[in-house]
Amino acid sequence: MCPAAGTSFGTACAASRHASAAGCSGPLNLGDTELDATHPTLPARTAFVQGLPQAPAQVVLSGSENARIDDELARLDGPIQRALINRD
């Protein structure tokens, strides 16, 4: 299953020309592929993040603060999806 399944990114991948070209009917399984020349592969990004030292959170948000941020970012989902899908 695609690691991005169920996310806005997974939805954009599924709707993109790349998913159609690969014959995918659902979210594109990124596997060892690159998004484009500026992005390392998913396994490389995962290994990088997992290799970072663990530290306690420096910023802790309340539930209401987190909800306000989520609401503010939600309005960007559509424009970002369209920008990703229409990229040439």
Image (tube, helix red, strand yellow):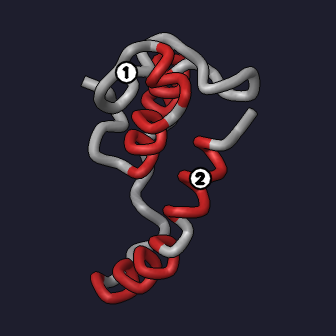
Residue type for callout 1: Asn
Q: Residue 82: give x, y in percent of width and height.
A: 59, 53
Crowd around label 1: few <14 · some 14–19 · many ≥20 (10 Å): some
Residue name at image x 45 percent, y 72 percent: 74
Q: Which residue is mark 2?
A: 82
Amino acid tagged 2? Arg
Q: What quarter of the picture does the C terminus occupy?
A: top right
**Front residue (pair 76, 70):** 76
- Looking at the rendering, in which quadrant would you find the N terminus? top left
- Dot 1 or dot 2, earlier in sequence: 1
Tag 2, which secondary structure?
Answer: helix
Q: Outermost residue, left direction? A: 1
Res 61 → quadrant: bottom left
Residue 28 drawn at (x, y percent): 39, 25
Which numbered marker is on residue 77? none
The residue drawn where x is 44% and y is 13% is 22
* Foreground residue among 33 and 44: 33
Instruction: Return the x and y of residue 65 as percentages of the image width and height.
Output: 39, 86
Q: Are marks 1 and 2 in contact (CB under 8 Å)?
A: no
**In the picture shown, does residue 81 fall above or below 58?**
above
Under tag 1, what secondary structure?
loop
Q: Residue at x 74, y 21 (%)?
A: 37
Q: Is residue 63 left or right of residue 42?
A: left
Classify residue 47 as left or right of residue 76. Answer: left
Relative to residue 7, is residue 75 depicted above or below?
A: below
Question: Residue at horizontal 60%, vertical 26%?
Answer: 35
Q: Is residue 72 above or below residue 1?
A: below
Q: Position of residue 54 (x, y in %)?
A: 42, 42
- Image quadrant of residue 14? top left
Task: Find disc 1 in the rendering and name its residue.
Answer: 29
**CA separation in Å, label 1 and label 2:** 19 Å
